Amino acid sequence: MTHTEYQNAVELLKKYSYHYYVLDDPITTDEEYDILYHKVVAYEHENPSHILADSPTQRVGDQPQEKFDKARHLSRMWSLEDLFNRDELDTWVNRITKVYGNVTFGCEPKFDGASLNLIYEGGRLSQAITRGDGVEGEDVTQNAKTIQSIPLSIDYAGRIEIRGEVVIFKDDFEQINEERLKNGESLFANPRNAAAGSLRQLDTRITASRRLVFMPYGIGENSLDIPNLSERMEWVYALGFRRPAMRHVCRSAEEIEGFYQEMLGVRDTFEMLLDGMVIKVDSISVQDELGYTVKNPRWAAAYKFPAIEKLTVLRDVILQVGRSGVVTPVAIVEPVDIEGVTVERSTLHNFDEIQRKDIRIGDKVIILRSGDVIPKIVKVIASERTGSEAVVPRPTHCPVCGSELLDEGALIKCQNLSCEARVVNSIIYFASKQCLNIDGLGDKIVEALHKAGLVHDVSDLFSLTMEQLLSLEGFKEKKSRNLIDAIAAARGCECWRFINALGIEHIGEVASKTLCGAFGTAFDTASREEILALEGFGGEMVESILEFVRVNGEKIETLRSILSPVAPVKIEAAENPFKGKSVVITGTMSVPRDVIKNLLESLGAKVASSVSKKTDYVVYGEDAGSKYDKAVELGVALLTESAFREMCEADASAPLADEATAPQGSGVKPKYSLFD
Ligand code: IVH
């Protein structure tokens, strides 16, 4: 590699990262990236004096630091005044409009993470400082450099402070905790703590592994002459920073309230936690005139969302035995309303975690529930103890079958294969939506069938008779017939459902689909090497499959002969407007989204979950939120559900424009139906 080739390679890697981490729109594969990255590493190894400061290799150091130095911000970092309701919003807005008349207010999400101040000088990131007391924080430059959405260099030579919030996506947070659970480490209470903790790691390699994300929200010291904050932020995004999924400049309290309600409605669809909406006077000159109180700017406020953390009392701890025998403690708490949902139970993960957090029955606890985050106990208020709280004992015997439990530390297991809980839960899993999707075979019915001695194993389901069902309480002719038909309908299932229904440890829906795609119904004949070569398959998964096949060969055979699963036959979709296109579905439709997804897939479309420049269409329903906004922003074609139906139903060979506008009832024979 020549010096020029090296410089070009660094530029290209930066471009790849920008697309991946800032725009959420990858333009290459991981493999291509890695190949180029390694070439750059090799060149730098040979030519250490040529290493560019903004080379991606410079993001992670290899020596842990001993401590963080204190560092002063160039200009103070402020807090925000909180507003909790419409009245407080009106008062706040009036105080400003009374004096300044028709000012406008930039509104954007309030990200729940850790604030960070980035100082750029001469186009380079020179320092990254945590908020601290607002005047002085800790120098975490080395850690900030590992955050891929923080550019190491920008196209601006002046000295400038760019401020933002470091967050962890909810999915990444759950994954980090899952891993920590496996390794017997203490869990992070919430994504905010995980982000703050990760930012303050002395070993940058740990920070680098945490997938932190920087969301810019403001500018500190600067010499810009852009008159509005919203335009200044546009300038910041153009430097290579992430842009929030929702932003709007509002003209009145009314409009602010409308946008707030809209954001609240889609709060759960954001990848990171939000705790409110921030409102900022847009004009910099008005901001300067309004000035600051001791703590807060008078030109900005946080309009808080309803809390997702609430105080409650731990009433009891009950034990659940899963299909694999793992005994999981579940907290029963004094019912508490969190955002319109009554929370009565929360996961406690395992007994090591209970001991580590010293959770006792009767304790006052803080519980967290955010839409898609499972309710969990975040903290025990130990200072409020009265002395009557009871320690939760580690169980020694299965609460269901009474057999002795195997205590492996983090996991406690019931070893009895015929334990009622294990059997019943395996059958419930077998019939569930992601497995054989047997209609009407829910928890209660499986329990009743097992209690009556009719079903001891999933294969027994297929020999159930009308007479047997009719003998059960609550089963009349119709219900019994429907159940027998639904069970029979599982025969000839898609092959991945058969694999998933076996309940092999570490093998879920995605892995089952991959196995089925590669080996068809004969996945159990594949070798270690063949399975390992599949995308997304690691050692643990492969061993789990091989062990399952070794122990359960007979069971696999029996089920295969009962179910006669079918491997997918790849039928190429006929020409149609969606073939080969990337489509995103958002908002509420008149039919479940899965129906539309299946239809699109049968038309040869790829249904993606997030909107990017590569998206061809966004099909939207009612209450569409951030994905709709993103589509507008990127100029992606938007289709209402009815426009989408018209395109599906129009003659597929007609040109696209005609299809989109084909009048209903035009006599064109429907080609695809939503209700197939
Ligand atoms: S503006 C002068 N905007 O919230 C304005 N802050 O409670 C100061 N935060 O310290 C902050 N998202 O860490 C602003 N969109 C946003 C924000 C945001 C999160 C954090 C920030 C700040 C804290 C104040």
Image (cartoon, rainbow, N blue to C red):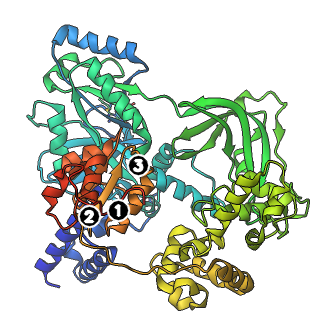
Which dot, 3 or 1, sits closer to the camera? Answer: 1
Distance from disc 3 to disc 2, alpha carbons, whole Å, reads: 27 Å
Distance from disc 1 to disc 2, alpha carbons, whole Å, reads: 7 Å
Mark seen at residue 271: 3
Residue nearest the viewer, comparing 488 with 614: 488
Amino acid beneath label 2 = Phe
**Residue at horizontal 40 percent and vertical 54 percent from the top:** 212
- Say what secondary structure mark 1 lies in: helix
Mark seen at residue 34: none
Q: Which of marks 1 and 2 is nearer the N terminus?
A: 2
* Residue 664 in the image: above or below residue 15: above
Q: Which of marks 3 and 1 is nearer the N terminus?
A: 3
Residue 290 in view of the camera: yes
Q: Would you say 45 lies left or right of 6 here?
A: right
Residue 60 in view of the camera: no
The residue carrying mark 1 is 600
